[in-house]
Image: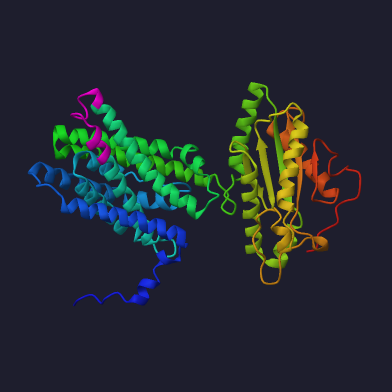
Amino acid sequence: MLPSPVRLREVTRWPVWSIPARLLGAVLAVELLALSLIVAGVLNLPPLDGRTLVLLATLAVAGVLHTEIIAGVERVRRYTAETHHVNLTSVWTFASALLLPPALGALVVVVIYTHLYVRVLRPVPPPQRRPVFREVYSTATVVLAVHAAAGILAATRPGELYDTLPGAVALVLTLLAYTVVNTCLVLGVVAMTAPDTPILRILFGGDELALELATLCLGALTASALVIGGPLVTLLAIPPIIALHRTVLVRQLREKADLDAKTGLLNHDAWHLRGSHELQLAERERRQAALLILDLDHFKEINDTHGHLYGDQVLAATARVLREELRDHDLVGRFGGEEFVVLLPRLSGHDGREELRQVAERLRGRVSGAPADEDARSAGGAPLPDGPADGPPAGRGGAGITVSIGGAVFPTDGGGMTALLEVADSALYAAKRAGRDTVRIGPHPSRAAGPGPEPEPEPI
Protein backbone atom coordinates (compact mmCIF):
# COMPACT_ATOMS: atom_id res chain seq x y z
CA MET A 1 0.00 0.00 0.00
CA LEU A 2 1.31 3.42 -0.94
CA PRO A 3 1.81 5.90 1.93
CA SER A 4 -0.86 8.56 2.17
CA PRO A 5 0.26 11.95 0.83
CA VAL A 6 1.15 14.69 3.30
CA ARG A 7 -1.73 17.12 3.56
CA LEU A 8 -1.16 20.86 3.30
CA ARG A 9 -2.72 21.35 6.73
CA GLU A 10 -0.11 19.03 8.24
CA VAL A 11 2.73 20.93 6.54
CA THR A 12 1.51 24.26 7.90
CA ARG A 13 1.60 22.81 11.41
CA TRP A 14 5.28 21.82 11.27
CA PRO A 15 7.22 23.30 14.23
CA VAL A 16 9.61 25.09 11.86
CA TRP A 17 6.94 27.69 11.05
CA SER A 18 6.70 28.67 14.69
CA ILE A 19 10.15 30.26 14.82
CA PRO A 20 10.48 34.03 14.17
CA ALA A 21 10.41 35.18 10.56
CA ARG A 22 13.94 36.62 10.65
CA LEU A 23 15.34 33.40 12.02
CA LEU A 24 13.24 31.30 9.65
CA GLY A 25 14.69 33.17 6.67
CA ALA A 26 18.26 32.56 7.81
CA VAL A 27 17.62 28.86 8.48
CA LEU A 28 15.95 28.30 5.10
CA ALA A 29 18.73 30.22 3.32
CA VAL A 30 21.42 27.98 4.83
CA GLU A 31 19.48 24.83 4.00
CA LEU A 32 18.76 26.00 0.44
CA LEU A 33 22.43 26.82 -0.12
CA ALA A 34 23.48 23.38 1.14
CA LEU A 35 20.93 21.67 -1.09
CA SER A 36 22.04 23.72 -4.11
CA LEU A 37 25.68 22.77 -3.57
CA ILE A 38 24.77 19.10 -3.30
CA VAL A 39 22.73 19.19 -6.53
CA ALA A 40 25.44 21.12 -8.37
CA GLY A 41 28.10 18.69 -7.14
CA VAL A 42 26.10 15.64 -8.21
CA LEU A 43 25.48 17.08 -11.69
CA ASN A 44 29.20 17.82 -12.15
CA LEU A 45 30.53 14.70 -10.45
CA PRO A 46 33.55 13.26 -12.27
CA PRO A 47 33.74 9.54 -13.08
CA LEU A 48 34.32 7.55 -9.91
CA ASP A 49 37.06 4.96 -9.58
CA GLY A 50 37.02 1.95 -7.28
CA ARG A 51 39.26 3.60 -4.68
CA THR A 52 36.89 6.55 -4.29
CA LEU A 53 33.89 4.25 -3.90
CA VAL A 54 35.73 2.23 -1.24
CA LEU A 55 36.55 5.40 0.70
CA LEU A 56 32.92 6.55 0.42
CA ALA A 57 31.58 3.24 1.72
CA THR A 58 34.22 3.01 4.47
CA LEU A 59 33.51 6.46 5.92
CA ALA A 60 29.73 6.06 5.74
CA VAL A 61 29.83 2.60 7.37
CA ALA A 62 32.30 3.79 10.03
CA GLY A 63 30.02 6.73 10.89
CA VAL A 64 26.98 4.46 11.17
CA LEU A 65 28.90 1.92 13.27
CA HIS A 66 30.15 4.74 15.51
CA THR A 67 26.56 5.91 16.13
CA GLU A 68 25.33 2.37 16.82
CA ILE A 69 27.99 1.84 19.49
CA ILE A 70 27.48 5.14 21.34
CA ALA A 71 23.74 5.70 20.74
CA GLY A 72 22.81 5.54 24.42
CA VAL A 73 25.72 7.69 25.57
CA GLU A 74 25.12 10.29 22.84
CA ARG A 75 21.42 10.50 23.68
CA VAL A 76 22.27 11.39 27.28
CA ARG A 77 24.96 13.83 26.14
CA ARG A 78 22.61 15.74 23.88
CA TYR A 79 19.89 16.12 26.46
CA THR A 80 22.18 17.10 29.34
CA ALA A 81 24.37 19.59 27.47
CA GLU A 82 23.95 23.18 28.73
CA THR A 83 26.04 24.76 26.01
CA HIS A 84 26.86 24.34 22.32
CA HIS A 85 26.86 20.59 21.60
CA VAL A 86 29.99 19.31 19.87
CA ASN A 87 29.16 16.46 17.53
CA LEU A 88 31.97 13.91 17.54
CA THR A 89 30.87 12.45 14.21
CA SER A 90 33.00 15.19 12.62
CA VAL A 91 35.80 12.61 12.72
CA TRP A 92 34.17 11.00 9.69
CA THR A 93 32.71 14.09 8.03
CA PHE A 94 36.04 15.94 8.11
CA ALA A 95 37.85 12.90 6.79
CA SER A 96 35.29 12.87 3.97
CA ALA A 97 36.08 16.51 3.18
CA LEU A 98 39.77 15.60 2.88
CA LEU A 99 39.42 12.44 0.79
CA LEU A 100 36.25 12.73 -1.32
CA PRO A 101 34.74 15.13 -3.83
CA PRO A 102 32.44 17.64 -2.07
CA ALA A 103 29.25 15.98 -3.33
CA LEU A 104 30.30 12.60 -1.95
CA GLY A 105 31.47 14.19 1.30
CA ALA A 106 28.00 15.74 1.61
CA LEU A 107 26.48 12.30 0.97
CA VAL A 108 28.45 10.89 3.91
CA VAL A 109 27.15 13.74 6.07
CA VAL A 110 23.53 13.05 5.08
CA VAL A 111 23.88 9.31 5.74
CA ILE A 112 25.49 9.80 9.16
CA TYR A 113 23.09 12.51 10.33
CA THR A 114 20.00 10.66 9.11
CA HIS A 115 21.10 7.55 10.98
CA LEU A 116 21.97 9.71 14.01
CA TYR A 117 18.45 11.11 14.07
CA VAL A 118 16.80 7.69 13.71
CA ARG A 119 18.91 5.97 16.38
CA VAL A 120 19.64 8.76 18.88
CA LEU A 121 17.04 11.52 18.64
CA ARG A 122 13.83 9.95 17.39
CA PRO A 123 13.52 7.40 20.24
CA VAL A 124 13.21 10.27 22.74
CA PRO A 125 9.49 10.82 23.45
CA PRO A 126 7.87 14.25 23.02
CA PRO A 127 8.09 16.93 24.29
CA GLN A 128 11.77 16.30 25.12
CA ARG A 129 12.48 15.24 21.54
CA ARG A 130 14.32 17.89 19.52
CA PRO A 131 12.35 19.09 16.47
CA VAL A 132 13.37 17.69 13.10
CA PHE A 133 14.07 21.11 11.59
CA ARG A 134 16.94 21.63 14.04
CA GLU A 135 18.60 18.43 12.88
CA VAL A 136 18.05 19.36 9.24
CA TYR A 137 19.73 22.70 9.90
CA SER A 138 22.64 21.00 11.68
CA THR A 139 23.08 18.69 8.71
CA ALA A 140 23.07 21.68 6.34
CA THR A 141 25.76 23.48 8.36
CA VAL A 142 28.04 20.43 8.21
CA VAL A 143 27.43 20.10 4.47
CA LEU A 144 28.52 23.71 4.03
CA ALA A 145 31.53 23.10 6.28
CA VAL A 146 32.56 20.13 4.12
CA HIS A 147 32.28 22.25 0.96
CA ALA A 148 34.27 25.08 2.58
CA ALA A 149 37.01 22.65 3.61
CA ALA A 150 37.08 21.07 0.17
CA GLY A 151 37.29 24.51 -1.45
CA ILE A 152 40.24 25.56 0.72
CA LEU A 153 41.90 22.23 0.03
CA ALA A 154 41.52 22.58 -3.72
CA ALA A 155 42.83 26.14 -3.69
CA THR A 156 45.86 25.63 -1.43
CA ARG A 157 47.07 22.05 -1.63
CA PRO A 158 50.34 21.99 -3.62
CA GLY A 159 50.85 18.28 -3.21
CA GLU A 160 50.23 15.57 -0.68
CA LEU A 161 48.81 16.83 2.61
CA TYR A 162 51.15 14.97 4.93
CA ASP A 163 54.41 14.91 3.00
CA THR A 164 55.35 18.59 2.74
CA LEU A 165 55.25 21.70 4.87
CA PRO A 166 52.95 23.55 2.40
CA GLY A 167 50.66 20.54 2.47
CA ALA A 168 50.55 20.63 6.28
CA VAL A 169 49.71 24.35 6.17
CA ALA A 170 46.92 23.58 3.71
CA LEU A 171 45.62 20.93 6.11
CA VAL A 172 45.53 23.44 9.00
CA LEU A 173 43.71 26.00 6.84
CA THR A 174 41.20 23.33 5.83
CA LEU A 175 40.58 22.40 9.45
CA LEU A 176 40.06 26.04 10.40
CA ALA A 177 37.67 26.61 7.50
CA TYR A 178 35.55 23.64 8.55
CA THR A 179 35.48 24.82 12.18
CA VAL A 180 34.70 28.45 11.42
CA VAL A 181 31.88 27.75 8.97
CA ASN A 182 30.17 25.14 11.13
CA THR A 183 30.58 27.01 14.44
CA CYS A 184 29.57 30.40 13.06
CA LEU A 185 26.42 29.05 11.41
CA VAL A 186 25.33 27.24 14.58
CA LEU A 187 26.15 30.02 17.04
CA GLY A 188 24.75 32.63 14.66
CA VAL A 189 21.33 31.03 14.95
CA VAL A 190 21.77 30.77 18.73
CA ALA A 191 22.54 34.49 18.88
CA MET A 192 19.49 35.35 16.77
CA THR A 193 17.26 33.14 18.91
CA ALA A 194 18.53 34.48 22.24
CA PRO A 195 20.46 37.76 21.84
CA ASP A 196 21.53 37.66 25.50
CA THR A 197 23.35 34.35 25.06
CA PRO A 198 27.05 34.75 26.00
CA ILE A 199 28.53 33.52 22.72
CA LEU A 200 32.13 34.24 23.72
CA ARG A 201 31.61 32.36 26.97
CA ILE A 202 30.31 29.36 25.01
CA LEU A 203 33.32 29.47 22.69
CA PHE A 204 36.10 30.17 25.15
CA GLY A 205 34.58 29.60 28.59
CA GLY A 206 34.67 25.82 28.43
CA ASP A 207 36.22 22.94 26.53
CA GLU A 208 33.82 22.90 23.58
CA LEU A 209 36.17 24.56 21.09
CA ALA A 210 39.11 22.40 22.18
CA LEU A 211 36.92 19.29 21.87
CA GLU A 212 35.88 20.31 18.36
CA LEU A 213 39.49 20.86 17.26
CA ALA A 214 40.61 17.57 18.84
CA THR A 215 37.87 15.69 17.00
CA LEU A 216 38.84 17.28 13.69
CA CYS A 217 42.50 16.42 14.28
CA LEU A 218 41.47 12.80 14.84
CA GLY A 219 39.54 13.03 11.58
CA ALA A 220 42.68 14.21 9.78
CA LEU A 221 44.67 11.32 11.27
CA THR A 222 41.93 8.90 10.22
CA ALA A 223 42.06 10.22 6.66
CA SER A 224 45.84 9.73 6.58
CA ALA A 225 45.53 6.20 7.94
CA LEU A 226 42.90 5.36 5.33
CA VAL A 227 45.20 6.47 2.52
CA ILE A 228 48.12 4.48 3.89
CA GLY A 229 46.59 1.38 5.44
CA GLY A 230 43.21 0.76 3.85
CA PRO A 231 39.61 0.55 5.13
CA LEU A 232 40.20 -1.65 8.17
CA VAL A 233 42.37 1.04 9.76
CA THR A 234 39.20 2.99 10.59
CA LEU A 235 38.52 0.40 13.31
CA LEU A 236 41.44 1.88 15.24
CA ALA A 237 39.73 5.28 15.35
CA ILE A 238 36.53 4.01 16.98
CA PRO A 239 37.87 3.13 20.49
CA PRO A 240 39.35 6.63 21.08
CA ILE A 241 36.06 8.20 19.96
CA ILE A 242 34.06 5.99 22.33
CA ALA A 243 36.40 6.89 25.20
CA LEU A 244 36.03 10.58 24.31
CA HIS A 245 32.23 10.27 24.32
CA ARG A 246 32.22 8.72 27.77
CA THR A 247 34.73 11.19 29.18
CA VAL A 248 32.71 14.15 27.97
CA LEU A 249 29.49 12.60 29.28
CA VAL A 250 31.01 12.12 32.75
CA ARG A 251 32.11 15.76 32.76
CA GLN A 252 28.64 16.95 31.71
CA LEU A 253 26.91 14.85 34.36
CA ARG A 254 29.32 16.09 37.02
CA GLU A 255 28.67 19.71 36.01
CA LYS A 256 24.93 19.11 35.99
CA ALA A 257 25.08 17.56 39.46
CA ASP A 258 26.69 20.77 40.73
CA LEU A 259 23.78 22.93 39.54
CA ASP A 260 20.53 23.84 41.24
CA ALA A 261 17.65 22.60 39.08
CA LYS A 262 15.40 25.66 39.53
CA THR A 263 17.94 28.42 38.94
CA GLY A 264 20.88 26.90 37.05
CA LEU A 265 23.23 28.31 39.70
CA LEU A 266 25.69 26.30 41.76
CA ASN A 267 24.05 24.33 44.54
CA HIS A 268 25.09 24.64 48.18
CA ASP A 269 27.77 21.94 48.22
CA ALA A 270 29.34 22.87 44.86
CA TRP A 271 29.45 26.57 45.73
CA HIS A 272 30.97 25.92 49.14
CA LEU A 273 33.67 23.67 47.66
CA ARG A 274 34.64 26.06 44.88
CA GLY A 275 34.36 29.09 47.14
CA SER A 276 36.70 27.57 49.73
CA HIS A 277 39.23 26.90 46.98
CA GLU A 278 39.00 30.52 45.78
CA LEU A 279 39.53 31.82 49.30
CA GLN A 280 42.64 29.67 49.62
CA LEU A 281 43.98 31.21 46.41
CA ALA A 282 43.13 34.70 47.68
CA GLU A 283 44.99 34.02 50.92
CA ARG A 284 47.99 32.68 49.05
CA GLU A 285 48.08 35.72 46.73
CA ARG A 286 47.28 38.14 49.57
CA ARG A 287 44.34 39.79 47.86
CA GLN A 288 40.91 40.79 49.04
CA ALA A 289 37.75 38.83 48.33
CA ALA A 290 34.15 39.29 49.44
CA LEU A 291 30.97 37.36 50.12
CA LEU A 292 27.29 38.35 49.80
CA ILE A 293 24.16 36.61 51.05
CA LEU A 294 20.91 37.70 49.38
CA ASP A 295 17.44 36.86 50.67
CA LEU A 296 14.21 37.64 48.78
CA ASP A 297 11.84 39.52 51.05
CA HIS A 298 8.41 38.10 51.86
CA PHE A 299 9.00 35.15 49.56
CA LYS A 300 6.66 32.92 51.54
CA GLU A 301 3.91 35.45 50.90
CA ILE A 302 4.61 35.25 47.16
CA ASN A 303 4.33 31.47 47.24
CA ASP A 304 1.18 31.51 49.37
CA THR A 305 -0.53 34.14 47.21
CA HIS A 306 0.50 33.13 43.70
CA GLY A 307 1.66 29.55 43.99
CA HIS A 308 4.98 27.78 44.06
CA LEU A 309 5.30 27.61 40.28
CA TYR A 310 5.31 31.38 40.08
CA GLY A 311 7.73 31.48 43.00
CA ASP A 312 10.06 29.25 40.99
CA GLN A 313 9.86 31.74 38.12
CA VAL A 314 10.86 34.54 40.48
CA LEU A 315 13.82 32.50 41.68
CA ALA A 316 14.93 31.81 38.11
CA ALA A 317 14.58 35.49 37.14
CA THR A 318 16.59 36.58 40.18
CA ALA A 319 19.32 34.09 39.26
CA ARG A 320 19.38 35.52 35.74
CA VAL A 321 19.85 39.04 37.15
CA LEU A 322 22.77 37.88 39.28
CA ARG A 323 24.47 36.21 36.33
CA GLU A 324 24.05 39.33 34.19
CA GLU A 325 25.32 41.75 36.82
CA LEU A 326 28.35 39.80 38.04
CA ARG A 327 31.60 38.88 36.37
CA ASP A 328 32.27 35.50 34.80
CA HIS A 329 34.72 34.47 37.52
CA ASP A 330 32.39 35.42 40.39
CA LEU A 331 30.77 32.39 42.04
CA VAL A 332 26.98 32.56 42.33
CA GLY A 333 24.99 29.88 44.13
CA ARG A 334 21.63 29.11 45.66
CA PHE A 335 21.78 28.16 49.31
CA GLY A 336 18.23 26.89 49.43
CA GLY A 337 14.79 28.45 49.69
CA GLU A 338 14.91 32.10 48.65
CA GLU A 339 18.56 32.61 49.65
CA PHE A 340 21.42 33.23 47.22
CA VAL A 341 25.12 33.56 47.90
CA VAL A 342 27.88 35.27 45.88
CA LEU A 343 31.66 35.09 46.23
CA LEU A 344 33.69 37.86 44.63
CA PRO A 345 37.18 36.31 44.52
CA ARG A 346 38.90 39.47 43.23
CA LEU A 347 38.16 42.98 44.43
CA SER A 348 39.69 45.64 42.21
CA GLY A 349 39.76 48.64 44.58
CA HIS A 350 41.74 49.42 47.74
CA ASP A 351 38.60 49.92 49.81
CA GLY A 352 37.09 46.45 49.62
CA ARG A 353 34.16 47.27 51.89
CA GLU A 354 33.02 50.21 49.77
CA GLU A 355 33.45 48.25 46.54
CA LEU A 356 31.39 45.42 48.00
CA ARG A 357 28.70 47.85 49.08
CA GLN A 358 28.48 49.27 45.55
CA VAL A 359 28.14 45.79 44.07
CA ALA A 360 25.48 44.87 46.62
CA GLU A 361 23.51 48.07 45.99
CA ARG A 362 23.61 47.43 42.26
CA LEU A 363 22.25 43.93 42.75
CA ARG A 364 19.58 45.18 45.16
CA GLY A 365 18.54 47.87 42.69
CA ARG A 366 18.23 45.41 39.81
CA VAL A 367 16.05 43.01 41.77
CA SER A 368 14.10 45.58 43.77
CA GLY A 369 13.65 47.86 40.77
CA ALA A 370 10.88 45.66 39.36
CA PRO A 371 7.62 47.19 40.66
CA ALA A 372 4.23 45.81 39.89
CA ASP A 373 3.12 48.24 37.19
CA GLU A 374 4.35 47.67 33.64
CA ASP A 375 5.49 51.25 33.01
CA ALA A 376 7.84 51.23 35.98
CA ARG A 377 9.05 47.75 35.05
CA SER A 378 10.24 49.01 31.68
CA ALA A 379 12.39 51.62 33.43
CA GLY A 380 15.21 49.13 33.98
CA GLY A 381 14.25 46.76 36.75
CA ALA A 382 14.95 43.08 36.88
CA PRO A 383 13.24 41.00 34.14
CA LEU A 384 10.94 39.24 36.56
CA PRO A 385 8.17 37.09 35.08
CA ASP A 386 4.67 38.36 34.47
CA GLY A 387 2.31 37.69 37.32
CA PRO A 388 -0.58 35.27 37.19
CA ALA A 389 -4.13 36.28 36.42
CA ASP A 390 -4.81 37.60 39.91
CA GLY A 391 -2.03 40.17 39.64
CA PRO A 392 1.72 40.38 40.13
CA PRO A 393 3.27 39.50 43.47
CA ALA A 394 3.65 42.27 45.94
CA GLY A 395 5.25 42.66 49.31
CA ARG A 396 3.76 44.59 52.16
CA GLY A 397 2.10 47.84 51.18
CA GLY A 398 1.92 46.82 47.54
CA ALA A 399 5.68 47.02 47.00
CA GLY A 400 7.32 44.93 44.32
CA ILE A 401 9.76 42.08 44.88
CA THR A 402 12.70 43.20 47.02
CA VAL A 403 15.88 41.66 48.35
CA SER A 404 17.91 42.12 51.53
CA ILE A 405 21.68 41.68 51.33
CA GLY A 406 24.42 41.07 53.88
CA GLY A 407 28.11 41.07 53.07
CA ALA A 408 31.56 40.35 54.45
CA VAL A 409 35.09 41.13 53.24
CA PHE A 410 38.00 38.67 53.27
CA PRO A 411 40.28 38.72 55.27
CA THR A 412 39.05 41.73 57.27
CA ASP A 413 35.80 40.13 58.45
CA GLY A 414 36.99 36.53 58.55
CA GLY A 415 39.84 34.31 57.47
CA GLY A 416 37.79 31.38 56.19
CA MET A 417 34.52 30.43 54.58
CA THR A 418 32.70 29.65 57.82
CA ALA A 419 33.68 32.95 59.43
CA LEU A 420 32.68 34.96 56.35
CA LEU A 421 29.30 33.23 56.16
CA GLU A 422 28.64 33.99 59.81
CA VAL A 423 29.48 37.68 59.38
CA ALA A 424 27.46 37.99 56.17
CA ASP A 425 24.53 36.20 57.78
CA SER A 426 24.56 38.60 60.74
CA ALA A 427 24.68 41.51 58.28
CA LEU A 428 21.75 40.03 56.36
CA TYR A 429 19.76 39.76 59.58
CA ALA A 430 20.58 43.40 60.34
CA ALA A 431 19.27 44.35 56.88
CA LYS A 432 16.05 42.48 57.64
CA ARG A 433 15.70 44.28 60.96
CA ALA A 434 16.27 47.63 59.23
CA GLY A 435 13.13 47.14 57.17
CA ARG A 436 14.31 44.88 54.31
CA ASP A 437 15.28 45.99 50.77
CA THR A 438 18.54 47.08 52.40
CA VAL A 439 22.27 46.35 52.28
CA ARG A 440 24.43 45.82 55.36
CA ILE A 441 28.17 45.04 55.25
CA GLY A 442 30.42 43.70 58.00
CA PRO A 443 29.92 42.36 61.51
CA HIS A 444 26.62 43.09 63.29
CA PRO A 445 25.25 41.98 66.65
CA SER A 446 24.10 38.39 66.79
CA ARG A 447 20.48 37.47 66.31
CA ALA A 448 20.02 36.57 69.93
CA ALA A 449 21.57 39.71 71.40
CA GLY A 450 20.95 42.12 68.58
CA PRO A 451 19.52 45.52 69.58
CA GLY A 452 16.45 46.96 68.01
CA PRO A 453 13.05 45.50 67.32
CA GLU A 454 12.67 42.07 65.81
CA PRO A 455 11.40 42.02 62.22
CA GLU A 456 7.65 41.92 61.91
CA PRO A 457 6.53 38.30 61.48
CA GLU A 458 5.30 37.41 58.04
CA PRO A 459 1.76 36.09 57.71
CA ILE A 460 1.36 32.36 57.43
Q: Residue at x 72, y 56 (%)?
A: 370
Q: Which residues are magenta?
A: 151-166
Q: Percent position (x, y) of residue 423? A: 77, 37
Q: Nearer the viewer, residue 438 or 166?
A: 166
Horizontal side of 184 relative to 389 (left or right) equals left
Horizontal side of 428 relative to 179 (left or right) equals right
Residue 5: in sight, yes or no? yes
Which quarter shows the C terminus? bottom right
Residue 238: in sight, yes or no? no
Q: Any magenta on residue 57?
A: no
Q: Which quadrant would residue 118 be assigned to in this image? A: bottom left
Q: Any magenta on residue 165?
A: yes
Q: Percent position (x, y) of residue 285? A: 64, 22
Q: Percent position (x, y) of residue 52? A: 13, 43
Q: Percent position (x, y) of residue 306? A: 69, 67
Q: Which quadrant would residue 252 be assigned to in this image? A: top left
| Residue ranking furthest to the right | 452
Which quarter shows the N terminus? bottom left
Q: Residue at x 44, y 61 (%)?
A: 128
Q: Residue at x 28, y 40 (%)?
A: 149
Horizontal side of 402 relative to 235 (left or right) equals right
Q: How is the image coloured?
A: rainbow
Q: Is residue 393 above or below residue 233?
A: below
Q: Is residue 95 above or below residue 78?
A: above
